[in-house]
Image (spheres, rainbow, N blue to C red):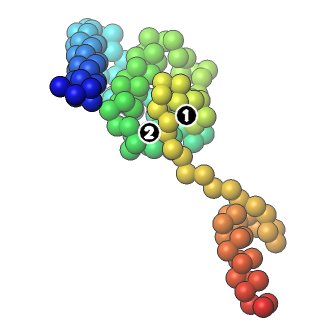
Amino acid sequence: MSEEDLELERLKAKRLAEMQKNISIKRDVESIPESTNESISETPRDLLIKILGFRGMEVLENAESQFPNETKMIVEKLSELIKSGEINVNEENIDGGKLLALFRSVGLNIRMATKINVEQDGKFVSLSDKFSNRSSDNGDEE
């Protein structure tokens, strides 16, 4: 076997171990008596969405589209922390910046759309629109 094949096998084994660990955690959560669960029909994602603050939903949706499996695991862990009371729903909101920092701290570089607005004639316009207007204006003058 080549070195690349060995590395691929190691990555597969690591991923399999992670999946087995997640399955065992899921079984443990399911084995908790129904009376201790606050809301049976509520998904971990729904629970997290309730405490998301400014731009939190945008970050979550980008993470789900770019890293669906990893995001699902992180959402499940966050919901466990909410259920256990380690994240206080009444006092803490997770805004987009905090959520993005969390994803990046675990190695997921979530790409976000960036838009810079500038004021022009009393209105906010995107920087790209301002440059495109200026370049078209310059072309007319020549």
Q: Quadrant of residue 61?
A: top left
Residue nearer the viewer, 82 or 2: 2
Q: Residue at x 72, y 78 (%)?
A: 135
Q: Position of residue 67 (x, y in %)?
A: 38, 37
Q: Residue at x 37, y 30 (%)?
A: 70
Residue nearer the viewer, 64 or 50: 64
Specify whether 40 is left or right of 128: left
Disc assigned to residue 63? 2
Q: Position of residue 7 (x, y in %)?
A: 28, 25
Residue nearer the viewer, 72 or 81: 72
Rendered position, 21 above or below 69 = above
Amino acid type at image mark 2: Ala
The residue singled out by tag 1 in the image is 100
Specify whether 84 is left or right of 17: right
Rendered position, 95 above or below 33 = below
Disc assigned to residue 133? none
Q: Are marks 1 and 2 in contact (CB under 8 Å)?
A: no
In the image, farthest residue toward the front = 2
Please tell me how crowded label 2 is: few (under 14), some (14-19), or many (20+) other residues with Cα within 10 Å.
many
Mark 1 or mark 2: name the one nearer the start of the chain: 2
Q: Secondary structure under badge 1?
A: helix
Residue nearer the viewer, 29 or 89: 29
In the image, farthest residue toward the left = 1
Q: Quadrant of the C terminus?
A: bottom right
Q: Position of residue 4 (x, y in %)?
A: 27, 30
Specify whether 54 is left or right of 15: right
Instruction: Give how far apart the Cα atoms at labels 1 and 2 are.
Output: 9 Å
Q: Secondary structure under badge 2?
A: helix
- Residue 67 appears in the figure: yes
Q: Residue at x 67, y 74 (%)?
A: 132
